Amino acid sequence: MNSSEELDYPKQILEYKDGFLVSKTMFAACELGVFDVLHESELALSAAAVAARLGTSVNGTDRLLSACVGLKLLKAEMKNEEAFYANTDLSSIYLTKSSPRSLYHMMMYYSHTMYKCWQFLPEAIRDGKNQYERAFGISSKEIFDALYRSEDEMATFMHHMDSIWNICGKDVITAFDLSVFSTVYDLGGCSGGLAKQFVSVYPESTVTILDMPKVVQTAKKHFITGEEHRISFHEGDFFNDPIPQADLFIMARIIHDWTEDKCSQLLNKIYKSCKPGGGLLLVEVLLNEDKSGPLTSQLYSLNMLVQTEGKERTRTEYSKLLTASGFKDIQVKATGKIYDAILGRK
């Protein structure tokens, strides 16, 4: 029950109200290059010095830097009644472009693409479909080519897709012992972020990434070097083109994009290509069976509504999809991070 104090001052609701102010403050600081400028400087900088390097107003920069201190993304030291700013360890690791663990491109995708779609969340709930047409004036089928027309735009999107595996990749790959699978196909594996994690854990295995030609060409140029000799590419559309045989198939953040019918169509196709004794590893966020959470998964499911035709699912729903396609011995492992692992065997 709510206490009378909570009802008199609804602190939680007021904090939720400001949620988008927090995220857009962080996105703006990333986009303007605040964390990069401070990272490159050997000394803490004043708001005026940061503004001069960014070409922004001192007034606006001062307010942005102060807000980032409040968010614990920056730290400030007062000298002669003037604040001098520096990155925290957290922002240096995750919000600077040059960091190996950077989430900068993820922030830009959220700010430029997701945020625009989420402005039409009420319409998505009324219509029951994604909102690309309202947000961008084009259909969801056209969005890929329209938003990522250049190689740079494609590489930026792929950096976004890749970055989460620096945080969650090893956890989902080690959720089960996958060392028995020597030939692996990562369907929709994009830039190879999860494939790199796989071969680092299982050095006797090889991974082939099957993705669209445009994605493969960009990945070869920007993401996979000659050193990753156990990772190769296969250009194709896994819905319409043949899927080669393999011991293990990986589908990370793929099934949640699609309707039940399309999921079944794809899973049936994978089952036929899976070698006897082989398996399929799904990497997805999971909803609690009783609909109580986790909140991140529930919000991601709303995001699937505004951006795709799919949804997030419970472990029971994933198990039913796999079982209906012929897979058995379904196991589910929660990693304690955003993404969990579901393994089915043939």
Image (spheres, rainbow, N blue to C red):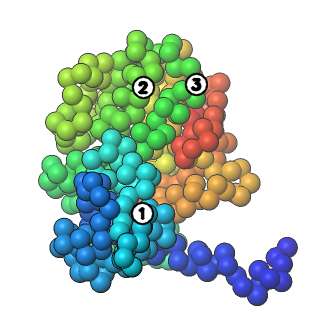
Disc 1 designates what residue?
A: 74
Q: Is residue 318 visible?
A: no
Disc 2 designates what residue?
A: 198
Percent coordinates x, y for residue 173 in the rendering: 50, 29
Residue type, mark 2 in image: Phe
Apparent side of residue 70 relative to residue 153 in the rendered image (left or right):
right
Compare residues 215 and 128 and report the one nearer the observer.
Answer: 215
Disc 3 designates what residue?
A: 176
Name the image quarter holding the N terminus: bottom right
Q: Are marks 1 and 3 in contact (CB under 8 Å)?
A: no
Residue lying at the far bottom of the rendered structure: 8
Q: Residues within 10 Å of mark 1 (few under 14, many from 20)?
A: many
Q: Are marks 3 and 2 in contact (CB under 8 Å)?
A: no
Mark seen at residue 102: none
Residue at 65% of width from left, 24% of height from top?
329
Residue lying at the far left of the rendered structure: 150
Percent coordinates x, y for residue 120 in the rendering: 43, 75
Residue type, mark 1 in image: Leu
* Vertical arrangement, residue 35 with respect to residue 169, above or below: below
Mark 2 or mark 1, whichever is nearer to me: 1
Cα separation between marks 3 and 2: 12 Å
Residue at 57% of width from left, 40% of height from top?
340
Determine the image quadrant of residue 334: top right
Residue type, mark 3 in image: Phe
Percent coordinates x, y for residue 254 in the rendering: 43, 43
Mark 1 or mark 3, whichever is nearer to me: 1
Cα separation between marks 2 and 1: 34 Å
